[in-house]
Image (tube, helix red, strand yellow):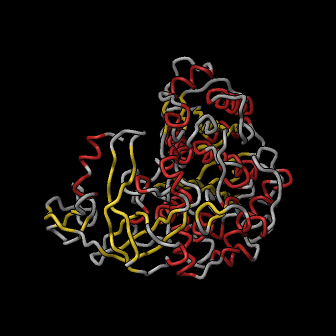
Amino acid sequence: MREVGIIGAGLTRFKEHWDSSLRDLFVEAALKAIDDAETPEIDSMYVGCMSSGLFVGQEHIGPLLADYLGLKNVPTVRVESACASGALALRLGFMEIASGMSDIVLVSGVEKMTDCDDPTSALAAAADIENEAFFGATFPALYALIARAHMDRYGTTREQLAAVSVKNHKNGAKNPDAQFQREVSLETVLNSFMVADPLTLLQCSPITDGAAAIILVPLDMVKKMKDRVVKITGSGVASDTIALHSRKDITSLEAVRLAGERAYKMAGRKPEDIDVCEVHDCFSIAELIVVEELGFVEKGNSGRFIEEGNTEIGGRIPVNTSGGLKAKGHPVGASGIAQVIEIYKQLIGNAEERQVKNARIGMAQNMGGTGASSVVHIMEVAE
Amino acid sequence: MSTQKIWRERIGRYRLIGQKCKGCGKVLFPKRLICPECGGRDFDEEQMPDVGKIVTYTTVYVGPKFLELDTPYIIAVIEFNNGVRVTTQVVDVDPKEVSTGKEVKLVYRKLQAEGKTGVIAYGYKAQLV
């Protein structure tokens, strides 16, 4: 396998883009990545997108987006694994370069959510439509079921759940690309509108438009062109039952644990080696369980771990320095790529006010549905 | 939603019929072609009980379009004594009375309707015993 490096990255601001279409958003992010990479040539392209069909009524977006980016006749693949579509697109581009099939691959993610009048139903398609959504289970409801079970078993409190949002908004306030660039207090989070008990509005990631893109090349090429070189050293993917109720343990996310183990194994790393991590905080409870599954804290103790400040910038393991899905925004197909871009920025020392000191090894964890799919990548500064 | 889909799902949704794997004895609901436990492909039909208990639950205040008028409503994971779990609504109850571990009985209810005059899909919801 060839070693794979990142040579360019770009993203749109995450927000409600009333004046931009799906294709506008994608092209903006892709052009920024291409300009950053200083290479106009692209051998092939992957785009992660959960549901252009339900959100804007357009399928077949691989060729559509290549066409609008001016990439004539390039091979293009649209990747779908619900909210993990972006990281899975990155994984496929990583494999294509590692295998020697291509030298310059654009991996991207995009979602245009605000053109849709019932995004809650569109998002529910990431669950088991026949056996969960058809009975009225929305995504906040499914994660609320997980949260209640975690509270019942481990004594996790509402305040500990809310602390995730407080921390992520604090980080998002320092991110010029974030949808919500303001801090919120614990009381504001707890007293915001109840969506699905115990999850309040400020514990749910928002509806967002946005796109993100990365150019992957063989590591040797990055070394020739960039001063600060970042390589992808671990890539892990795993799946689980589509329906939450089919899992043996509702308080666990087995696909996250397995994807993490596979990425750690490929990279030859362990949880203590990670300096900075982006995780899939679609709901507050998700971040709590993910930090357990990735091995940063033992099972059931994540509430206290986060409450004590261990995951803040400057803490033991800074989590979601970008603001996470909660504050940065969650254009579902783009989130997995945007997470990797945040880690890339941290590793090249370009994360501005959010910079984690001496960050050399980073991790990004993306997740689809209630954890039916998960993708984990480890990135490192190369000598 | 389509008429034939609602018809196709009647065995599970209307009659609570699932299956038992002849290989390992795992009970599955709704029916599948392969046992996820042992890979077996031979099954006997198995009637699900109509009583179970609440594993976890939530009160939903923001619902999808088809349930806009029904909020707040309760969604729960229910477990039968044969190990099978389902997700459905708990109805006819004050949310304050619902808690983990409480016993429920499945009842036959309307789930969704297609448009104003379209086909109605029925299925199971739960009531506290």
The location of residue B21, given as percent across then percent down, is 18, 66
Q: Is residue A2 among what the camera can see?
A: no
The vertical placement of A252 against A334, above or below, is: below
Front one among A132 and A153: A132
- Name the image quarter holding residue B62: bottom right
Relative to A28, A358 lies left or right: right
The location of residue B84, given as percent across then percent down, is 31, 70
- Name the image quarter holding residue A360: bottom right
Query: What residue is at 40 percent from the left and 66 percent from the top?
Result: A245
Front one among A2 and B110: B110
Front one among A301 and A21: A21
Relative to A38, A357 lies left or right: right
Query: What residue is at 22 percent from the left and 63 percent from the top?
Result: B18
The vertical placement of B121 against B52, above or below, is: above
The number of callouts visible is: 0
The location of residue A56, given as percent across then percent down, is 55, 32
- Name the image quarter holding residue A198: bottom right
Query: What residue is at 16 percent from the left and 68 percent from the top?
Result: B23
Q: Is residue A213 among what the camera can see?
A: yes
- The furthest residue to the right: A353
